[in-house]
Structures are given as C-alpha cells and as structure tokens.
Amino acid sequence: MKKRIICLALVLIMVLSVSSCIVSKTRYDYNMEKYVELVDYSDFKVDLELDSIQAAIDSSIMDYATEYKVQVGDEIYVDITAKEVLYTETESGTVIDQKGDEIADLKEEGLLLKVGSNEYASKVENSILGTKIGEKTQLKIKLPDDFKHESYRGKEVYIDITVKSKVCNEGDIVLVKYKGFFLDKDGNKIPNPDKKDEKDEEYKIFDSNSNAKFYLGSKMAIEGFEENIVGMKVNETKSFKATFPDDYDNESVKGQTVEFEVTVTGLSVAPIFNDDFVKAYFPDYKSTEEFTKALKEKYILSNIYEYITSNSKILKYPKAELRDAERELKNIEEEFKKEYGIELDAYIEAYFDMTRDEYVKSNMKSEMIYYAIKQHENIEPTDEQLLEEVDSLIEYYKNYYMENDKLDENSAKLKAQSFVNSLGSTYSYENVLFRLVDEFLVKTAKVTEKPRTYTSITEKLAEADKPVTE
C-alpha cells in the first residue's frame, strides 16, 4: 500500500509539472520582493547530526536486503530425521541401497547448529549452506568414526534436514510484530479501560505494528529494543522492558519505562555498505564517500529550506500563475479519477492533508521562494547547463522507454525527444534553476557537525568484509 501511495503522489506531481510547463513559457517574471518577504537566511546555522546521516544509510541498506540463506558461522535450528541404508542383492548380483526404518536415536527436533563448526557432521552442515528457512535437504552420508552415537559410527544413513530457524544477530534485518504496553509505578501492565469484549486489547498500549523492520545493531530504535531481539529466533515471542529517553518526541512515553511484546516473523540479510553497493544501487555516486556527502547535503538543505519556507511570507500570489495552477488541476480531474479510482480532491486531502486551494498555494509558495532567492542572489542557469539538462532528460526517458515499452534504442530516443519537447523549456529551466539554488544554500550554510554517539553495524560489517592485506 505504501508503494502505491508514493506512486500516486509522483504521478500527480508529474502531471501538474507537465501541464504547468505547457501553459506558460515564463513564470514569476516579476520583482519577487513584492510577492515574497524572504527571511534573512545568511546567518542560519545547521547542526549536522551525524547519527541521523548514519541512520539514513542504514535505512537505505534495509531497502536492498535479500532473503536469508544459511551461511558459515550462522547459528541455526534444524530438524533431522535419519534412516539406515539397506543393501539388497538381486539375482543379477547388483547391490541396491534403500531406506530402512527411521532411526529414533538420530532424530533431532530444534537442534542448534553453528554452521561450519562440524560439531554434528560436516556433510550435514555443508548440505544446508545456501538454503532458506523452511527448506529441506536430503543426502546420504557415512557417519564419522567418532560420531556421538557409538552404535552408528561408520554407518551409512539417509539424512533429511529441515532448516527451522536462525538465531538473530547483529547485521540481520528482522521483520517483527510488536505491541508496546504502558506500565504503572510498580512496573505492571495497565489494564485497558476501554476494553469492551474479548477482541479488545487486555492492556493499555501506546503502539503496535504487525510488519515492522529493524536492522539489528544500527541503533535506529530506542536503547534496549534491538539488543533484546539479538539472540531470538524466527517465530519466537519475547517480552522485555525498555526506557524511552527524556527527549523523545512522543510526549506520552518520553522518559517512561514500558514493556514490549515482540515476535520475530521473518529475516533477511543486509548487503555490505561499500563502493560496490553504492555503484549497484545508487549509480549517481561512485563511492561510499560520495554517497555519504550527498546525504549530508540533503540534510543541510532540508534544514535550511524548512527554515526559509516556515519563516518567509507570501505577500500575494501572482494572479496569472494562480489561475494557471487552478486550471491545471481542473483539467486532470476526470482522467485522474478514471486512472486511479479516486476523486482528485479526496486524494489531495488523504495524502497531503490539504484542501485543493491549500495544495495549490503550498506548491506555489515553494516555487516563489526559489525564484525570490534566484533574484536576491543573482542566480541564473547558463545556456550550456540548460542544453545539458535537456540531453540528460532525453537520455533518462530513452532508457525508460527501452526498459518499460521494450522499444529499440532509436525508437526510444525519438519518443523521449518528443516527450521532452512537450514538457517545454520551463521544465528544464526550473530543474536547473532549483538545483543551482539548492547548491547555493548548501554551500553558504553555516554547518556544525555533531559527533557520532555510536559505531554503526554498517561500519562493523564493512570493516569485517575488507580483504586482509599484508
């Protein structure tokens, strides 16, 4: 559902952008001081919280986690059944092996194995490498001469091994469902005063989630939460207490000790945060350093732009642009409802928490502030930058049409050129202008970096993955 919402939001923005560019070749060609009262941002200071940058890196990594598969060093739980190999002589003298009765002494349920330790049998452990939770493997082996059951040493047996679970550890990404309960002064859960029938929660809760994801060791949750999940196994439920910090942003629980009931429902594995990861999933960057720098710049920009938009005033909205924006929404109403099955006004209210008029003016405020900063700082795109932007857009849409419409390169390029032309010159102009304004704000911001308070599991895993050099 979340992806669907994001998709709708992007479609709406794209439709509005395209329509706007077609309607008007020039926008906000005014003395913007008459329309925008800009706050003085020259002395604005940004506290760059490096913990937040690391949290953003960890969040990005979670998006590209892969399904868990058994690997060396994992502690896993398995079920094992075994049947002795029987040999039968046929008339032709050929020896045929077959399964005998199940060997009760070799049956194991929930056996904990550390893969690679060879504590059980090396072939058994090796056979489950690369398998997923719930998968079964089968093999025929000769038990070692020092096997723990003396009567089966040296015998050939058929083994069925089912991977049941894994011990959760730092570096794992776990899917959990949880409930958070308020506690009284004696540390007991508080009965739910609104309970009316057996379907209602027995105790008073402050939060619950049936599909939460955590990167163990990243410190993205409050202290004590991830630490208590480490050591749990998939499908295990555990209750524990944790205390929210005094500066927590939720007033109802800040500074309070609460109780969590957590069930681990799934498991995946994070990729290593290194240059290869960045180049594979974020091709605009070539290294972790470039990627981290970009995150810092986005953090700085979001802070200073939030300050500017919150403290600047719109004195009046230009009538022509306001009329165009209102007409643009009117023009796409019918098509929007037909495509997505929802009224445009209802969508704006549901996903932007605004009325149509508020939505239009909010978008215009952002644009007007960019143009006001442009005039105040004398920022203007060059012809070369504009041409590069058009070429970049054509290349982007060419690749899009090749991948999604399965067009050959020449056809895709022609379609991309036609589409970019339909966007109009204002579209590429504003792309460049807004980017230049962003770069100016980041470059001139007065930034103080707040030091890290922890070593992220991202860094630990990356360090462990580095090849050993002489």
Image: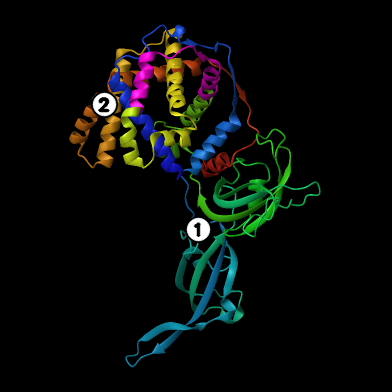
Decide whether residue 314 is among the magenta residues: yes
Between residue 307 and residue 46, name the one nearer to us: 307
Q: Is residue 441 left or right of residue 381?
A: right
Between residue 80 and residue 150, name the one nearer to us: 80
In this rendering, is residue 56 above or below 100? above
- Where is residue 18 shown, x and y percent of the image? 31, 26
The residue wearing badge 2 is 420
In this rendering, is residue 151 above or below 61? below
Please, what is the three-letter code of the amino acid marked with disc 1?
Val
Q: Provide the major secondary structure of the magenta segment.
A: helix
Highlighted magenta segment, given as a residue range: 301-329
Which SS class for mark 1? Answer: loop
The residue wearing badge 1 is 70
Q: Is residue 397 left or right of residue 200?
A: left
- Which is closer to the viewer, label 2 or label 1? 2
The residues bearing labels 2 and 1 have C-alpha atoms spaced at a distance of 48 Å
Q: Residue 1 is drawn in which quadrant?
A: top left
Picture disc at residue 320? none
In this rendering, is residue 150 above or below 359? below
- Where is residue 52 shown, x and y percent of the image? 58, 32
**In terms of sequence position, does the residue under pointer 2 or pointer 1 come before the other?**
1
Classify mark 2: residues with Cα within 10 Å, few (<14), some (14-19) or many (20+): some
Q: Residue 248 is drawn in which quadrant?
A: top right
In this rendering, is residue 17 above or below 220? above
Residue extending furthest toward the bottom: 91
Q: From this viewpoint, is residue 272 visible?
A: no
Residue extending furthest toward the right: 186
Decide whether residue 38 is among the magenta residues: no
- Where is residue 144 shown, x and y percent of the image? 54, 73
Residue at position x 21%, y 32% in the image: 415
Residue at position x 45%, y 10% in the image: 35
Q: Is residue 222 left or right of residue 396?
A: right
